[in-house]
Amino acid sequence: MIFMTIGLLIISLILVILGAEALVRGSSSFALRLRISPLLIGLTIVAYGTSFPELIVSAKAALEVKGDISMGNIIGSNIFNIATILGLSALVRPLKVKSQLVRKDTPVMIGVALLLLFFFRDFYLSRPEGLLLLIGILIYTGIIIRSATRERLSQKTENHLDEGLPHTLKNIWLDFGFITTGFVLLFIGANLLVDKAVVLARIIGVSQAVIGLTIVAAGTSIPELATSIIAARRNQADIAIANVVGSNIFNILGILGISSLIHPIRGIDIKILDFYWMIGTSIILLPFLQTGFRLNRWEGFCLLASYTIYLFLLWPK
């Protein structure tokens, strides 16, 4: 039984990695073809697409009145996204940062994390609060799309992109084919990964909150991990960083908004430490990105170290 579970976990990881590769290749080509900034693609198509596993898991948990898993999944994913994904991505290749991410999108990510702390101060997320969150993601998406329509890629940006992606795919249908295939593989792989990880966690015997904050959160964040690392390796820093920032914003505003509309979320085993760690990692990322508009390897190492410390404090002794 346990060997079969481990085997399925390995298969799910392969599916997720293949899906991430297809998604990055298709979305990058699509951005070049339509002269749309990869920053926009990373903040929307890639970020929201790789957050589908979180959406499925949190919505299902809310429907089954498992609020600790629903909320823990999002808080844990946001911590994992910054501390582990950006940490590893920076170790693969130092990431150049667009000024928009520093001036606009990262502060928005910090702001929505603080908003969630305010809404969940009574360890309960109601339907009206969820509706406000959902309205927030619609407004945010509308703003960045409107901003992007006013831009055209400069020659300098095109040359930079060519370093990571020399050519577009043969036609736009291949772009859509890669993007769709990527989403499908991510969807199947992430769900299989989470299901088997939860089975193993039950054998270990830990609370639903800890499962949500660690195993489920890390499992549903595997698409973001694979996508950002592959994007970093392909010199697509815009997608690597924007994928994480956009996913974190969507996780709180979109996923918790939808999940709490399905059923109000109560998370009695979620600790204030978890919120503080999520907000803290979001805040510390800002000065890291501001230093020369680059996320360096030593900063990536610091982010990874912070996640190790968090796991040590969280996991039952």
Image: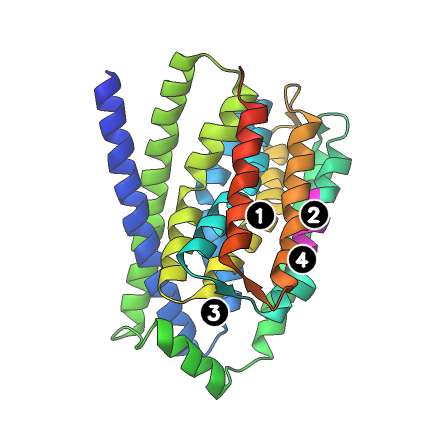
Name the residue at 50% across, 82% down: 153
The answer for how far apart the CA atoms under marks 2 and 3 are is: 23 Å
Q: CA distance from mark 3 to mark 1?
A: 18 Å
Chain-order first, disc 2 or disc 4: 2
| Alpha carbons under labels 2 and 4: distance apart | 18 Å
| Magenta residue span | 106-113
Q: Nearer the viewer, mark 4 or mark 3?
A: 4
**Does the magenta stretch mainly form a helix, a strand or a loop?**
helix
Q: For numbered disc 3, what is the local secondary structure?
A: helix
Q: Which residue: 53% across, 19% down?
A: 208
Which residue matches tag 3?
38
Q: Which residue is mark 1?
A: 248
Write down the residue under mark 2: 112
Dot 2 or dot 1, earlier in sequence? 2
Amino acid type shown at disc 3: Pro
Position of 291 with respect to 47 (left or right) is: right
